[in-house]
Image: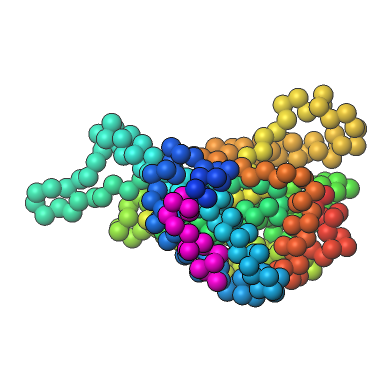
Amino acid sequence: MAYDATLQFLTDEELAALIKAGPLYDSAIHEKIPVSEWRKNAELHVLYNSIELLHNSEVMSNLSVHSDAIASRVYHFYLPILFRVLFLLEEHRKKQKSDMEKNGGGNEGGEGGSKKQQFYPKPLFIGIEAPQGLGKSTLVDVLQTLIDNSVVLSLDDLYLPRDMQQDLGQKKHPGNPLLTFRGNPGTHDLPLARETIKKLKSINEDLGEGQATVALPRYNKKACNGRGDRLPMEDWPSVSGPTDIVFLEGWCLGFERLREFESLISSVDARVYFAPINEYLMEYESVFNSAIDSWMVIKAGDWRWAYEWRQEQERKHNGGVKDAPGINFFD
């Protein structure tokens, strides 16, 4: 299966032509990558995802058709993004080292048996934004699989605990459907997000000297009949340095508040409902947007696709928001 899906039967010239035909191909970055590297990473990607593919009855029932679709996704989407990320990481390292040298830093130690302190740059923070259901989590899973020393922090894991979400919707903003359930700006735990990002920013400091670990919050969307709740802290995974990249992903990541809010929204009801979200976005800019070094934005050709893909995602994970109330929830 991996053989067909990664088009290993093509000659180097044929595969190079296919790669260059992709919409994300950038000659300044991708032309320097040998075809052998594209092949190797394509095989790794399909290998790591083969178990999921084997359990997908639709794919397995018509593998010859889906192999082409998988190959297109790998060579025209995942791998061009992978190599762009690696390019951004190299540029980030160069800048960090240059800044350190300008400030008189560098490796310490020398004679007398003192230990050298190896320079290690701060992690590169890459923000990934796309509508719900468009594959942000799948993309970062692929990138994290293929890039060593990478960490993923998702806005989906930073939602308020269930009791705080109920207080937000029932007491602080009663009757506002946009804040009744998790999803919109205002329903995330911003103090937790700020603290977690701060710790990740400094995770490479003092490597080897009792290096710090960072606990990554986790949220269970299946809890409370699909309304969700935060997992206990003892169930959160921990990471430690060295960390090269932090992928921060979320559907409303990068959003900014409307500066001329009143004039842009004519409906009185809409202004009432959206006004608090617009205010919350001010702090989102400070917590999330200011932390990002580089952005990736995935756009859908039709916004209605988000409904179909998100409902498919919820059904796949069993126990999420069901089809009947799903449209209202996503709205």
- Identify the magenta region: 1-16
**Front residue (pair 91, 291):** 91
Numbered label tally: 0
> Seen in the image, is 80 located left or right of residue 34?
right
Q: Can residue 15 be found in the magenta stretch?
A: yes
> For residue 209, which quarter of the picture?
bottom left
- Colour scheme: rainbow
**Front residue (pair 206, 102):** 102
Q: Which residue is drawn at 63% across and 59% down?
A: 69
Q: Can residue 70 be found in the magenta stretch?
A: no
Q: Residue at x 71, y 52 (%)?
A: 132
Tell me if residue 65 can be seen: yes
Residue 171 lies, in percent from the top left, at 82, 50
Residue 229 lies, in percent from the top left, at 70, 63
**Front residue (pair 85, 210):** 85
Residue 269 lies, in percent from the top left, at 90, 37
**Front residue (pair 313, 252):** 313
